[in-house]
Amino acid sequence: MENITTDRLLLRPWEDSDVDFVYDLYSRWVVQRFIGQEPRVMESRSEAVERVERFKAINHPIHGIWAVTGKDDGRLLGTLLLKPIPESGEEPMVASQDVEIGWHFHPDQWGNGYASEAANAVLEHAFLSGLPRVVAVTNPANESSQSVCRRIGMAEKGLTEKYYNSTCELFVLENPATS
Ligand SMILES: CC(C)(COP(=O)(O)OP(=O)(O)OC[C@H]1O[C@@H](n2cnc3c(N)ncnc32)[C@H](O)[C@@H]1OP(=O)(O)O)[C@@H](O)C(=O)NCCC(=O)NCCS
């Protein structure tokens, strides 16, 4: 997984020393409320340790789960992911052929354009790497996340039940080089 830089951000692999931030981020209801079929907050630091291990385990030339940090000061801001999306079906769901982009930012960092800036850079990386398209799904009530999808140019496709065994709002962006 390669580092990605933008004007204000450095996207880098997760490190063991990021556990406290991960716990702070995912133990908040405002962050978790629209994530998953049955949203729940992280309840122990050991869950954060496991989460960082899972983030680090993705070792792939294109896919990744990046720690988004300030380029100048290194402070942690959130998570940006690019990975195969689970297809609805019997649990445990299996990954589909489609690749999703997603974002989870600390509430103290909302309203600065960081999620959109990081997502734009990851889309560019995805398309330069040859992915034909990238999808994003949100809880139908998650207007902030839908705004990010629109801001980065994704096309709204309406509700779908194709992924995550849930009803989601689907956004798609085709690779301009291959579509
Ligand atoms: C979804 C989420 C990442 C959106 O964060 P965000 O900060 O609103 O998104 P952006 O990075 O696109 O920032 C846009 C906002 O920054 C403002 N902004 C300020 N400076 C800016 C700049 N330089 N460039 C762009 N926008 C800027 C925009 O005006 C906009 O503000 P508004 O929401 O008042 O209209 C955030 O709400 C979140 O982490 N939620 C919890 C997790 C979650 O639900 N994830 C999605 C699961 S599908």
Image: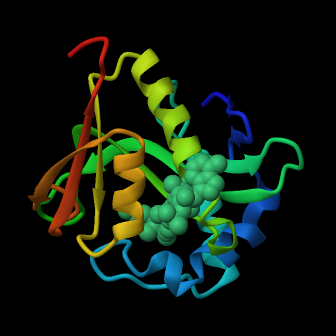
Q: Nearer the viewer, residue 133 or 41?
A: 133
Note whether 10 is above or below 34 in the view shown.
above
Q: Nearer the viewer, residue 141 or 15?
A: 141
Residue extending farthest top: 177
Residue extending farthest right: 73
Q: Position of residue 121 (x, y in %)?
A: 55, 33
Q: How many discs appear?
A: 0
Q: Nearer the viewer, residue 115 or 111?
A: 111
> Which corner quadrant of the image does residue 92 belong to?
bottom left
- The answer to whether 66 appears left or right of 102 in the picture is right
Q: Quadrant of the N terminus?
A: top right
Note whether 84 is above or below 106 in the view shown.
above
Q: Quadrant of the C terminus?
A: top left
The type of colouring in the image is rainbow
Q: In the image, what residue occupies the spot 64% across and 28% down?
A: 2
Note whether 114 is above or below 117 in the view shown.
below
The answer to whether one can see residue 55 in this image is no
Q: Nearer the viewer, residue 134 or 18?
A: 134
Q: Position of residue 39 (x, y in %)?
A: 37, 82
- The answer to whether 23 appears left or right of 55 in the picture is right
Q: Position of residue 155 (x, y in %)?
A: 23, 42
Q: In the image, what residue occupies the spot 31% across and 82% down?
A: 38
The answer to whether one can see residue 127 in this image is yes
> Which corner quadrant of the image does residue 79 belong to?
bottom right
Q: In the image, what residue occupies the spot 51% across and 76% down?
A: 31
Q: Position of residue 128 (x, y in %)?
A: 45, 16
Q: In the image, what residue occupies the spot 67% across and 75% down?
A: 23
